[in-house]
Image: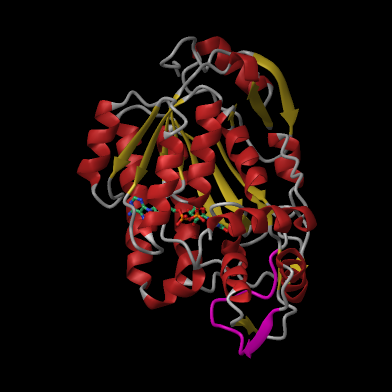
Amino acid sequence: MAGRHGRALWPVVLAMYAAGSGGLATHPRGGAQAGLVARAIRHSTFVLHAATVAAMNVLVTGGAGFIGSHVCERLLGAGHAVWAFDDLNNFYDPAIKERNVEVLRALGKKFTFVHGDLTNRAALDALFGGAKLDQVIHLAARAGVRPSLQDPALYQRVNVEGTVHLLEAARARGVKKITIASSSSVYGVNAKVPFSEADPIFSAISPYAASKLACEALGHVYHHIYGMDVAMLRFFTVYGPRQRPDLAIYKFARLITAGKPIPVFGDGSAARDYTYVTDTVDGVIACTQREFGFEIFNLGESQTVALHELIALLEKSLGQKAIIDRQPLQPGDVPITFANIDKARARLGYNPRVKIAEGIPKFVEWFLQQR
Ligand SMILES: NC(=O)c1ccc[n+]([C@@H]2O[C@H](COP(=O)([O-])OP(=O)(O)OC[C@H]3O[C@@H](n4cnc5c(N)ncnc54)[C@H](O)[C@@H]3O)[C@@H](O)[C@H]2O)c1
């Protein structure tokens, strides 16, 4: 794959490779020699040395959103040209997304914002036709477990049909490399903790989780049939600056500072593996620098935090006590998420750094500046 701003991206510049299991490294455009190398290091991951990764044209779907805007910022900082594609829908206040886009524009780098809807194939074709894209990072989705129960068809339309449109548009233009957001929710009520990529995942308990499961299956299809290089990333509750306002940490911070009760579903023992957004971005970027064939990775901190512990951390950082409004457990909520990240460590060099006790004060600092 040729970088559009200079040297080739895909030549076999294998400064190193990290051994791992369960994956076949394929080399879509490397010719016979590369094929031999690929066969020789079966079950390994090609790592493109950072210094050899030429500037690329990268499409980030959902680039105006929480994680997407951070990914765009990191890519722009590294000298890549970035297209952010987003429909700025009102799942939460679109003004927040517009502000994220302004932050990216203000960096004064090679940034293009495209206002469009994933479910509109023509919009995607126009984008792929106009920009000579090297890679796609697919983060656009209808997110959120509970809202997916209100409008399950919308979640399937955007997350499943929209993903098909994107994969088709990429295939038609010969864009071979795509990194796709999945979710820890695909594990459903998993009896075994921590969750590993090899665990059976047929116990989804929300339409959102089912839509992400379908995305993973589609990623495999496009790898198998068309030789696309696909990484599926199971994010575990991501938080940090620009966090979605519908997520618990943001919602709790808003209610605590307003002196209003916070709804706590269940007895407060439900536990989550919270991931600071810069760690998530590290994992996403690592995927853009490697070839896998097809792989799934957990991206979490591999540490669980009970809801009552999270509230205590927020109270400490905000300097205010929370008023608890205890509610019954909600349908679709899982009791625990807990990532085994051995595979991401071995294959991506993923090494999450920001523990929750450090991340919450960072989030609160940003949150207080917004008001
Ligand atoms: N934040 C988390 O904790 C978390 C956890 C697991 C998985 N994920 C996944 O990570 C990705 C990013 O999540 P986020 O938290 O940044 O959410 P977000 O809602 O802030 O970002 C998603 C973006 O996609 C855009 N979008 C939605 N539908 C679209 C459509 N039809 N066409 C074009 N754009 C559309 C939205 O406008 C939004 O800006 C999503 O795929 C989500 O499912 C997030």
Q: How is the model colour-coded?
A: secondary structure
User: At which x and y percent is residue 234?
Assistant: 59, 52
Q: In this view, does 142 lie above or below 181?
A: below
Residue 97 seen from this side: yes
Q: Nearer the viewer, residue 108 or 306?
A: 108
332 relative to 82 in the view: left or right: right
Q: Give the range drawn in magenta.
A: 322-337
Q: In this view, does 91 lie above or below 12?
A: below
Q: Nearer the viewer, residue 250 or 179?
A: 250
Q: Number of marks in the image? A: 0
**Which residue does the image show at 62% across and 33% down from the upper left?**
286
**Which residue does the image show at 54% across and 74% down from the upper left?**
205
Q: Nearer the viewer, residue 34 or 186?
A: 186
In the image, is residue 79 part of the stretch drawn in magenta?
Answer: no
User: At which x and y percent is residue 305?
Assistant: 76, 66
The image quadrant in which ligand 1 is located: bottom left
User: At which x and y percent is residue 254?
Assistant: 57, 70
User: At which x and y percent is residue 194?
Assistant: 76, 61
**Which residue does the image show at 35% across and 27% down from the upper left?**
174
107 relative to 342 in the view: left or right: left
In the image, is residue 329 part of the stretch drawn in magenta?
Answer: yes
Give the overall secondary structure of the magenta segment: loop
**Which residue does the image show at 41% across and 34% down from the upper left?**
105
Quadrant placement of the N terminus:
top left
Residue 192 seen from this side: no
Q: Tell which residue pokes out farthest to the left in this image.
A: 122
